[in-house]
Amino acid sequence: MGNHVHVRLHQGLSVSEEGELVEHYRCRCGATWTKVYQADGTDPESPA
Ligand SMILES: [Zn+2]
């Protein structure tokens, strides 16, 4: 179980108090990530 490539499984979305969109990811090993999209930012890859 030494070398392990994390697999970021999408766990859902939430919205922070500032109105930022927060994406949650989790690997099967227990590692977690969050990705925050700034509310006033412009992400060209955003589906919405
Ligand atoms: Zn992992």
Image: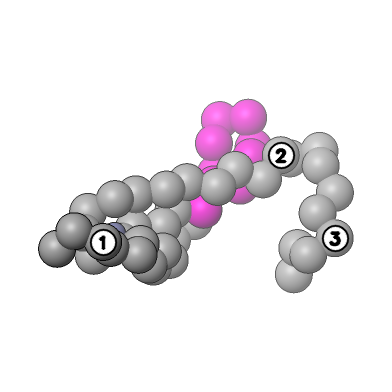
Residue at the spot x=51%, y=53% of the render?
A: 23
In the rendering, at what x and y percent does residue 25 appear?
A: 41, 57
In the rendering, at what x and y percent does residue 39 appear?
A: 73, 40
Q: CA distance from mark 2 to mark 3?
A: 13 Å
Along the horizontal axis of the image, is 40 left or right of 38?
A: right
Mark in front: 2 vs 3: 3
The residue that disc 3 covers is 44
In the rendering, at what x and y percent does residue 7 appear?
A: 37, 67
Earlier in the chain: of badge 3 and badge 1, it is 1
Earlier in the chain: of badge 2 and badge 1, it is 1
Q: CA distance from mark 2 to mark 1?
A: 33 Å
The residue that disc 2 covers is 38
Residue type, numbered disc 2? Gln
Q: Is residue 14 magenta?
A: no
The residue that disc 1 covers is 3
Residue type, numbered disc 1? Asn
**Mark 1 and mark 3 in contact (Cβ < 8 Å)?**
no
Magenta segment boundaries in residue numbering: 15-23
Residue 13, which numbered label?
A: none
Along the horizontal axis of the image, is 16 left or right of 3?
A: right
In the rendering, at what x and y percent does residue 30 appear?
A: 22, 54
Q: Label 2 crowding class (10 Å Cα cut-off): few <14, some 14-19, many 20+?
A: some
Residue type, numbered disc 3? Pro
